[in-house]
Image: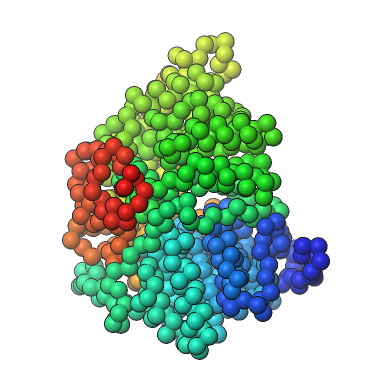
Amino acid sequence: MTMKENGHTTRKLALPDEILLSVQKPARYLGNEANAVYKDPGKVDIRFAMCFPDVYEVGMSHLGIQILYDMFNRREDTWCERVYSPWLDLDKILRERKIPLFALESQDPIRDMDFLGITLQFELCYTNVLQVLDLSGIPLRACDRDESVPIVIGGGPCSYNPEPMAEFFDMFYIGEGEVVYDQLLDLYKSMKAAGKSRREFLMAAACQVPGIYVPSLYEVSYKPDGTIASFAPTVPGVPARVVKQVVKELDEAPYPLHQLVPFIQITQDRAVVEIQRGCIRGCRFCQAGMIYRPNRERSYDLLKHYTDALIDNTGFDDFTLSSLSSSDYTCIKELVNYIVDTYGPRGTQLQLPSLRIDSFSLDVMARLQDARRGNLTFAPEAGSQRLRDVINKGLTEEEILFGAREAFRGGWKKVKLYFMLGLPTETPEDRREIAELANKIAVAYFQEVPKEKRNGRCDITVSTSFFVPKPFTPFQWAPMYTPEQYLEFASTVYDGIQSVLNRRSIWYKYHEADGTVLEGFLARGDRRCSAVILEAYRLGAMYDAWIETWDYSRWLTACANMGVDMDFFALRERSLDEILPWDFIDIGVTKNFMIREWQRAQEGVITPNCREQCSGCGAGRFGCGCCVR
C-alpha cells in the first residue's frame, strides 16, 4: 500500500491493507501525522529511531521524545524517526509473518538505523524494551551485537539506575538530552566516515562525551552476602563516575514549536509548554525532585511566544503548562491570565497540573475554563502531620483544610486526594488519619456551602499507591513490604473510611500491591536482575503496567528459574555504607546530603524549600537556576 505524503510524494507502508484492517487502531502504525519530519535517507549521515516502549497513545504523549525529535531533525545530517511498541495483535502478526519492526516516518526496518534510542520512563516497561529489540531483529544482549545493527542507547529517569537493563544496552545517556547529544552524534559521524568499529565508537564516546555510560566497559564484583564489593571501569580513560548533564539556561535550549499532532486520541491529547524544570521542594520520596535539580525556569516572555506558536502550529484545543510543581513557577498567574484572556474566547482549554494545595491561587484556578466541572487534585501523600513531616511534604493540615474550604466556596465539589502507604516510620495510626483527613474535608464542604447550593454531596476520592524507595532519594535505603502487608495497609484505610461520619461522600481506590514490589525490584536492582527480565520476557511478560496483560506469576517463575531472590533487591533495607548499584552516577546532589535527609526523616525534621533556604544539597555546583538566584 502507498499513501500520499505532503500531497505529492508517495511512500510504501510496511504493512499491507489486510494487516492494517485486522488490528486495533491501525493509525498507530501509519505515521504521516501533522508536523512529522520526512527526509531523503540517501542525503543524511545518521538515522536515529526514537522509541518509547509502550503503545503509540502513551508514547506520543511524552514531551521528552518531542524535544529530541525536533532537536535531532534540525540537523541536516540526521533524520530522527519514531517507533513504539506494537500492541499484542500486531506483535503476533509480525512474529508469524517475520515482518521486522519499522519506523513510522520511512516505514523502514529499525535494524537499518544507526541508533535506536529508547526512553526508560518507568520500570514496568522493561520487557517491552526486549519486545522492540526482538521484533527489530536486534540481538537482545549487547554483547551479541555486531556492526550490522544499530547502537542501542537508553535515557530517561530510569537510566539513573541503568544496571538492571545494562545487559541490553550499548550505552546510556545520563541527564538532559539537549546538552551533549550533538557532540555524541558528531563523534559517531566522524568515526563512521573513518571506518571505525562499533567497539571503538563506544570506547571513544565513554571517554570523550560527558554523561555517556557504556556498561560493557565496567566490571562489578560482589561480596559473599550478595552486596556489591566493587564497581569500576576496565578500560583506561573511562570515567569512574558518570556526571549528569544539565541544561543551565532553559531559554537557550531547543524546544519543539511544531509538536506532532496525531490522527487518533492519545493519553495527553494537547499541546505542552514546559514552564520550568526541577523543583524547589525537597520531598524525600520524590526521585524527580532530586535528579532534576536545580530548579530552572523559562522566562515569561518566551513562554508567551511558545504558547502563541504552538497554538498556531498544532491546532490543539487543549493546552498544558508542564512542570513538577506548577504553582511554584514565579509568573504562573501572569501566564495563566495571558493564555485565558488571549485564547479562552477561542475555546482553548488550559490544563494546570501539579498544584500544591497550600500555594495555589483560587483566582488562578477559577480562570481555567470549565474547571469547576472537573476535579481538584491534591497530593497530601500522608494522612498525619507527623508523617508529612517525615517525608518533608511541607504541608500542614490547616493549609489543606483552608485550600479545601476556598475551593468549595469557589464552586468545586469534587476533590481527589493522593496518598502513599508503606512510607518509612509509618504506623497504623498514620493510615487511619487518611480517613480522618478526608472526613474533615467533607465537613468543610457542608460547613462552607449553603444547603440550597449544594446540589448533592461532595465527592472525595481517596487514592493510595504503595511507596517505592527510588534511587537518588533520601529514602533509597528504606525497606519495602510484601504484597500481603501492603493489602493490609489498604484494608486499614478502607476500614477507617467506613467508620467516619461522612463515609458516603468518600470513595477509595488503591493500586496493585504485587506490581509495586516488582517496581521496587527493578528500581533498586543491579546487573543480576537482567537475567530475570530476560527470562520473564521469554515466559510471555509484556505490557506489565497494563491490567489486561499483567501476570505476576511470570516474574516469580523467572526469579525462581534464574535463582534470584526478589526480596533481596526489593524489600531489604540498605545500610548507609553499602555500595548501591547507581553510586557511580553523579547527579550533583551528594550522597552526604541524602544521608542527612534520611536521618532528619527519622527525627521528623522539616528541611526548607530551596527558595527559603539553601540546604547545601550539592546541585549548586551546576551554577544555574535557583541555586544562583
In this picture, is 36 found above or below 95? above
In this rendering, is residue 323 above or below 17? above
Q: Is residue 95 placed above or below 402 in the rendered structure?
A: below
Question: From the viewer's perspective, is 590 left or right of 260?
Answer: left
- Front-most of 430 and 113? 113
Query: Residue 546 appears at what percent x and percent y?
Result: 54, 54
The residue depicted at 20 percent of the width and 49 percent of the height is 596
Q: How is the rendered protein coloured?
A: rainbow
Q: Is residue 296 left or right of 605 when viewed as pictured?
A: right
In the image, what residue occupies the spot 18% across and 61% down? Answer: 577
Whether residue 499 is visible to the viewer of this picture, yes or no, is no
For the N terminus, the image quarter is bottom right
Regarding residue 60, the answer to whether it shows in the image is yes
Query: Split into 4 quadrants, where in the image is the C terminus?
Result: top left
The residue sitting at 20% across, 43% down in the picture is 600
Please tell me whether residue 216 is drawn above or below residue 262 in the rendered image. Answer: below
Q: Which of 482 and 452 is in front in this view?
A: 452
Side (left or right) of 621 relative to 320: left
- In the image, residue 185 lies at what x, y percent? 50, 73
Residue 575 percent location from the top left of the image = 20, 58
| Residue sitting nearer the eye, 468 or 171 | 171
Quarter of the image where one finds residue 436: top left
Most extreme residue toward the right is 8
Residue drawn at (81%, 66%) of the image: 8
x and y percentages locating residue 34 in the rendered image: 70, 56
Q: Quadrant of residue 156?
A: bottom left
